Image (spheres, rainbow, N blue to C red):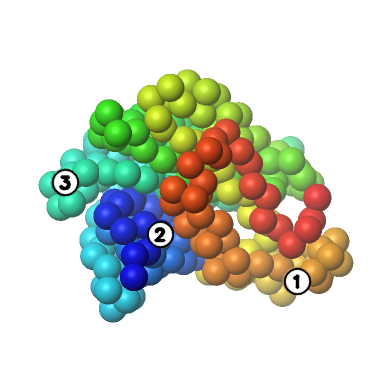
């Protein structure tokens, strides 16, 4: 029985844990060959690769800091060397920090914009150069923060608003080359990162759950199936869209 992504090759950036790991695993379950990118956690990336292989697909962990152009180029060249082509790029790598206006520094600003925005653009440019005449598919992992900007998150929210704008702009620029560009915008999701930041045992979580008609925050597996859909031919006439997955929070 054929699967939705049989024959496709996908890169998932920042895929050693959290939402990225779940996306990589779901892509593999649907038949894609998956490159699991990581910046630091080789152990986490290897675990994701093992799960994908166990489920019957092929996967490879490749280290690359997505703020460094030379490492981005290496990620794509090694992908081509291993699998011979590229069909899908999932721009998931990102970072978030919260700060009041008085606490914002150039370091805080550039840490998030260099990865969340510039890294995404550079990875997308590299992917487009490898898609070829057949076209391809870019899916950006943005955030509900792009439209619901919480207090003390001005810089982070700005990066995600930029991602949404980039998604729309590139969809128009690249559409004639048969390259689709969409974004998925999660709400608060239970990940290692949100756990480390103390967000899962906080008043913030309680307030988000009260705002949600479903009365809960998300899990990585709530996000990944939507990415599979956008990566598949089932969504072949969808581009430039921003899909909010936030339990009904608006």
Q: Earlier in the sequence, mark 1 or mark 2?
A: 2
In percent of width and height, residue 140 lies at 51, 43
Q: Secondary structure at mark 3?
A: loop
Question: How many numbered markers are drawn?
Answer: 3
Q: Is residue 76 visible?
A: yes
Mark 3 and mark 2: Cα distance apart in space: 20 Å
Q: Is residue 65 visible?
A: no
In percent of width and height, residue 75 lies at 25, 45
Q: Earlier in the sequence, mark 3 or mark 1?
A: 3
- Furthest residue in direction bottom, as rendered: 54
Above/below status of 203 relative to 149: below
Q: Residue at x 69, y 46 (%)?
A: 145
Looking at the rendered image, the quarter that the N terminus falls into is: bottom left
Q: Secondary structure at mark 2?
A: loop
Tag of residue 4: 2
In percent of width and height, residue 222 lies at 60, 66
Q: Nearer the viewer, mark 1 or mark 2?
A: 2
Above/below status of 52 relative to 134: below
In percent of width and height, residue 147 lies at 74, 41
Q: Nearer the viewer, residue 204 or 32?
A: 32
Tag of residue 32: none
Q: Which residue is mark 3?
A: 84
Q: Residue at x 27, y 55 (%)?
A: 7
Q: Which residue is mark 1?
A: 216
Q: Earlier in the sequence, mark 3 or mark 2?
A: 2
Q: Are marks 1 and 2 in contact (CB under 8 Å)?
A: no
Q: Nearer the viewer, mark 3 or mark 2?
A: 2
């Amino acid at each position: 029985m054929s699967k939705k992504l049989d024959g496709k090759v996908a890169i998932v950036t920042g895929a050693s844990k959290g939402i990225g790991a779940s996306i990589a695993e779901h892509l593999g379950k649907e038949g894609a060959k998956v490159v699991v990118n990581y910046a630091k956690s080789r152990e986490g990336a290897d675990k994701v690769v093992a799960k994908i292989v166990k489920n019957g697909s092929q996967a490879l962990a490749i280290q690359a800091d997505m703020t460094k152009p030379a490492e981005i180029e290496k990620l794509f060249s090694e992908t081509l060397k291993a699998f011979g082509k590229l069909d899908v790029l999932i721009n998931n790598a990102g970072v978030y920090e919260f700060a009041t206006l008085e606490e914002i520094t150039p370091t805080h600003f550039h840490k998030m914009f260099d990865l969340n925005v510039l890294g995404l653009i550079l990875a997308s440019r590299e992917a487009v150069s490898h898609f070829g005449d057949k076209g391809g598919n870019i899916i950006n992992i943005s955030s509900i923060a792009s439209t619901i900007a919480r207090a003390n998150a001005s810089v982070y929210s700005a990066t995600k608003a930029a991602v949404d704008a980039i998604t729309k702009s590139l969809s128009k620029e690249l559409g004639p080359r048969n390259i689709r560009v969409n974004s998925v915008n999660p709400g608060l999701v239970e990940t290692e990162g949100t756990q480390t930041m103390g967000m899962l045992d906080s008043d913030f979580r309680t307030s988000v759950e009260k705002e949600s008609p479903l009365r809960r925050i998300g899990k990585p597996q709530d996000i990944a199936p939507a990415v599979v859909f956008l990566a598949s031919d089932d969504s072949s006439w969808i581009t430039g869209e921003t899909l909010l997955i936030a339990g009904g929070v608006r």
